Amino acid sequence: MTTIAFIGLGHMGGPMAANLVKAGHEVLGYDLVASLRDASAQDGVSIAASAKEAVARAEVVITMLPMGKHVLAVWADVLPAARKGTLFIDSSTIDVESARKAHALAAEAGMASLDAPVSGGVGGAKAASLTFMAGGSDEAFARAKPVLEAMGRKIVHCGPAGNGQAAKICNNMILGISMIGVCEAFALGEKLGLSHQALFDVASTSSGQCWSLTSYCPVPGPVPTSPANNDYKPGFAAALMLKDLKLSQEAALAAGAATPMGAEAAQLYALYAGAGHGEADFSGIIHFLRGLGAVEATKA
């Protein structure tokens, strides 16, 4: 059993902390939102009075927070309260620069650290089937892996500090681009008189096959578990996809990389979210690509 502090008990962090409890670890949790603290308490998480209290006797600290500025603020606040040698893991999706700054903060305080963002959405968090993309030293990764395996199915060491975030940003840029491509194909197929099932049966077994089609098909019917069959309630909200695409474009600018399709995907998701659909699943952008207005898209 490992004593783990978990800071950030939201849609992703709450189920992840619950799975650590199920795996037999002692989990000390904290979140600014009282209702999230209460929900995690029901899952067996011991709720601390503050983030500092949570980390004070932890062997491992995991953060799952909205943005890089939040991660840096929390780490700066709690690092002095942690025991020397504590392993800090950040599973938030943030910019690479902030991730590397967080590693530097940990190193200065005498702590090991890992950036380990996830893929798999809320469903993966609940099912303990997430993919972790980790950046940091070999030693930190080896220490973290048994803990991460309680929350995920695939644990990949992507290289040194910040490379976990780099992998996550690149992966989600592929996802955003591919979803738009799949949505455009279904919108075109509708105009040409193709049934959704016919197009799916062809593309899912041909050169158009991709995860956005076979696991997350953006139209009702072919993939019963996709959000399209649940009124596009989010497994992964459009606002979060927009956040990740913006991160990809910031990284591309900093690295001098050309990502024209990533840039176009970011613009389309910005328009979709700006029309009031940020809380819908990101596959719901098919409504927008069909040319429907904001009100019609909501009802579609």
Image (cartoon, rainbow, N blue to C red):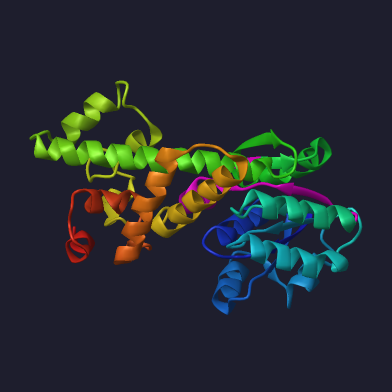
Place of residue 5 in the rendered image (x, y in percent of width and height, measured from the top left): 74, 62
At a point 33% along the width and 49% down the height, the residue shown is: 283
Camera-side residue: 173 or 212? 173
Q: Quadrant of residue 60?
A: bottom right
Q: Is residue 74 left or right of residue 217?
A: right
Q: Is residue 280 left or right of residue 121?
A: left
At a point 39% along the width and 40% down the height, the residue shown is: 177
Q: Quadrant of residue 206?
A: top left
Relative to 215, residue 108 above or below: below
- Please say whether residue 164 is one of the residues in the magenta stretch: no
Q: Is residue 75 left or right of residue 180?
A: right
Relative to 136, residue 267 above or below: below
* Residue 260 visible in the snapshot: yes
- Please say whether residue 128 is one of the residues in the magenta stretch: yes
Camera-side residue: 114 or 57? 114
* Residue 280 visible in the snapshot: no
Q: Is residue 245 left or right of residue 90?
A: left
At a point 86% along the width and 52% down the height, the residue shown is: 107
Place of residue 161 in the rendered image (x, y in percent of width and height, measured from the top left): 74, 43
At a point 58% along the width and 74% down the height, the residue shown is: 38
Residue extent of the magenta highlight: 110-133
Place of residue 230 in the rendered image (x, y in percent of width and height, measured from the top left): 29, 54
Q: Quadrant of residue 270?
A: bottom left
